[in-house]
Amino acid sequence: MSHEIPGTRLFDGELAMRGYALNKMCFSFNDAENRAAFLADEDAYCTRYGLNEAQRAAIRNRNVLQLIDAGGNVYYLAKFAGILKLDVQDLGAQQTGMTKDAFKAKLLAYAKD
């Protein structure tokens, strides 16, 4: 049974299989040496993990929605975002198409309700 949430990508088995290489690569970023290797040569690092073209494009574009569509799991993508000095609010803003300041203001407004 599938429950759709408008604007949300359900991370199911199909998406997990599609994103295996991407998520494995992002998990590798737990190691500082791997983060440095990625920053030194992103394309070679993506090749090492067997990323497909859609995943490589999403990495190049630094686009969270593309990464999720390419099979990225948000928990692993957080490792990638950390390399770029992005925090969860940066990711949320990108996912909602808002600026970071507008996204933060929206979070604060929800917290007051």
Image: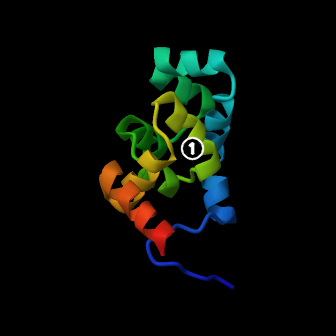
Vertical comparison of 93 with 86: above or below = below
Q: Name the residue rendered at 66%, 56% in the picture.
A: 16
* Badge count: 1
Vertical comparison of 5 with 31: above or below = below
Q: Name the residue rendered at 59%, 51% in the picture.
A: 74
Give left or right: position of 32 versus 59: right
Vertical comparison of 1 with 96: above or below = below
* Residue 112: image location, x then y, percent: 47, 70
Q: Which residue is mark 1?
A: 77
Q: Name the residue rendered at 56%, 16% in the picture.
A: 37
Q: Name the residue rendered at 59%, 36% in the picture.
A: 79
Closer to us: 49 or 65: 65
* Residue 7: image location, x then y, percent: 44, 72
Given the current orientation, which residue lies at the most extreme bottom position?
1
Q: Can see residue 80?
A: yes
Give left or right: position of 44 versus 14: left
Q: How is the image coloured?
A: rainbow
* Residue 107: image location, x then y, percent: 44, 62
Give left or right: position of 51 versus 54: right
Given the image, on which type of amino acid does mark 1 rest? Leu
Closer to us: 45 or 62: 62
Quadrant showing the N terminus = bottom right
Q: Can see residue 19?
A: no
Neighbour tally class for label 1: few under 14, some 14-19, many 20 plus, Cα within 10 Å: many
* Residue 23: image location, x then y, percent: 63, 43
At mark 1, the secondary structure is helix
